[in-house]
Image (cartoon, grey):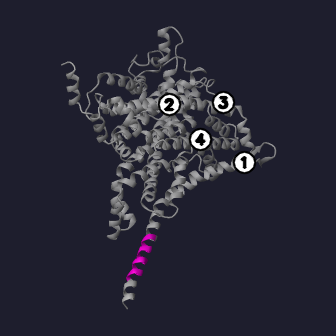
Amino acid sequence: MSAATPRLARKQFTPLRPKKSVGLTVVMLLFVVYSLIPLAWLVISSTKTQDALLNSFGLWFSGKFAFFDNIVWALTYEDGIFVRWLLNTLIYVVVGAGLATILATLAGYGLAKYDFPGRKVVFGVILGAIAVPGTALAVPTFLMFSKLGLTNTMWAVILPSAISPFGLYLIWVYATDAVPTELLEAARVDGAGELRTFLTISLRLLAPGVVTVSLFAIVATWNNYFLPLIMLNDPKLYPLTIGLQKWNAEAVGIGAQPVFTLVITGALLTIVPIVIAFLFLQRYWQTGLTAGGVKQ
Amino acid sequence: MTTMSAAAPQVAHERRRARLKTRLNLAGAGFVTPFLIGFALLVIAPVLYSLYLSLFRTQLIGGTSFVGLENYTQAFTDPKFWSGALRVLVFLVVQVPIMLVLALIAALAVDSGRLYGRSFFRLAIFLPYAVPGVVAVLMWGFMYSDRMGLTGYVNDLFGVQLITPYTRQWILTAIGNIVTWEYVGYNMLIFYSGLRSVSTELYEAAAIDGAGQMRTIFSIKLPALRGSIVVATIFSIIGSFQLFNEPNILKTIAPTIVTTNFTPNMYAYNLSFVGQQVNYAATMAIIMGVVTAVIAYVVQLRGSRQEF
């Protein structure tokens, strides 16, 4: 009987719907704790006054609940420069990531579905570029841009973000499977132009892949640090990431005004929009990756 | 007469096909051209410009002059460059395997269907990827500090200096922890997506053959993930060689521990923007780019060779 029980249990739980494991869940909870501890620390710290921040245990509330005071302070400090940084970031994300997605989608689709001469060479060169470290390009790009008078303008951040070889690669893989060549031929027989076919038929089929690429591009531009760091001098053009680091440098600098609370509250305000966007869109992200992308 | 009438439509047909081919070539090129223009200006041109710059040197007396490969020989004998290069290599060899194994374990656990609330786990572990690198470093950087974080309290609790991230011995580990935190969820998602695309029939067949959970993992799941593992490894290698954000931001907190040549990228950055030595910085960028590309290529080759 005792030998039969586990065997019975095994039959009920098929390999596709196995038995839930408390042990595994607990082990994985440790993983989640690791992932969430810094975020918990950030949220808790953003409720503290500077004094409490420096003199209390990091993972519990202490002293006066200064959350709203801190937010008001962060948003109004230096004539509301933080709001300016937020708007800049939005511009960089919308234009930069938008262009990156459009260009990668058009080119990935073109490479996947049209057999024009030189296609293989083009594809090889672009794939090779994925391995080129972005920071290796940064110094010469900066020098080129400074000759053209583009440094310290928004274009200096937007233009380099607009080219995403990895995005092109994802779309190429996705389009190969998701857009049937027969469908394109049928549209041709019906006399539809190539661009019209793309806009009315192919784009719809490519949608999950396009969302995936746009999410990667959004995260990359929202989190961009190195490029704006070297390209921009004027704090009025900074994105959030550079602005926060500026505040941080002020906070730890010698004889500086200790503005740790400002850095912490600013950091919280920086991650809230992207985390929300993320939670809403992760479903699509998942689909795009599974269907094509990194599957190989 | 009969031969003519048969040939005429065929010629017309061929002409139409040729015209269609031209039209398709034009359309294909049209789709790709906007990207290619940007690519040529923003990727190819900087690479070529870097190569050009690396062959010159600017001196206070005499101005800019052609020096051939002198910058390269200088770099190869520059201890400041080597100490940084060695540091990222150590980082790469230790941090990347730890992160990828953790990501793999998490992906297998989430995919196994044996967790209570599996979408919660997937989301929570993936969430740090959404956090900007700057914010991640600031959070950990503060938590590492004596005054407002956690390490000070942990040390007080034990009465000894148990955790000291801002010391020469531990700073690289402290950075490794931040990088792992940032990217373990991203890699988990890549692996998880790979696992999702394994046909469920394979699992059923394995179960019928009496394969247990572990056997299924080693015989079906891991082989199926080979492609994803290669991709994740290549991206992690590229990331390690580019190591910049984390040490550069921690530098504001611990300026004496994190030197200006802590990583090759930081060295190149400081050479060009603080030292005005753009030619030498370009040389360094090229060396690191070539090394990265070669290692990525070798990994790719080895990874795909095992597949056959």
Q: Quadrant of residue A90?
A: top left
What is the distance, in whole Å, between disc 2 and disc 4 at their CAs? 31 Å
Q: Quadrant of residue A274?
A: top left
- Which residue corresponds to the image point at 81% horizontal and 43% vertical from the top-left? B61
Look at the numbered discs 4 and 1 and tell me whether their residues touch, using CB distance below 8 Å.
no
Quadrant containing the N terminus of chain A in the rendered view? top left
Dot 3: element: helix
What is the distance, in whole Å, between disc 4 and disc 1 at their CAs? 23 Å
Dot 3 amino acid type: Ser
Which sits in the foreground, B192 or B263? B192
Look at the numbered discs 2 and 4 and tell me whether their residues touch, using CB distance below 8 Å.
no
Dot 4: element: helix
- To which residue does mark 3 refer? B83
To the question of a shared chain for discs 2 and 4, the answer is no
Q: Sequence order check: which comes first, mark 3 or mark 2?
A: 3
**Residue B199, x across and y down, in percent:** 32, 42
Q: Which mark is residue B97?
A: 2
To the question of a shared chain for discs 1 and 2, the answer is yes
Q: Which mark is residue B55?
A: 1
Look at the numbered discs 3 and 4 and tell me whether their residues touch, using CB distance below 8 Å.
no
Dot 1 amino acid type: Leu
Dot 4 amino acid type: Ile
Q: Write the start and end of the magenta stretch as one range.
A: B9-21
Chain ID for label 4? A
To the question of a shared chain for discs 3 and 4, the answer is no
Which sits in the foreground, B19 or B258? B19
Pointer 1: residues within 10 angstroms few (<14), some, or many (20+)?
Answer: some
- Which residue corresponds to the image point at 75% horizontal and 43% vertical from the top-left? B70
**Residue B215, x across and y down, in percent:** 36, 31
Pointer 3: residues within 10 angstroms few (<14), some, or many (20+)?
Answer: some
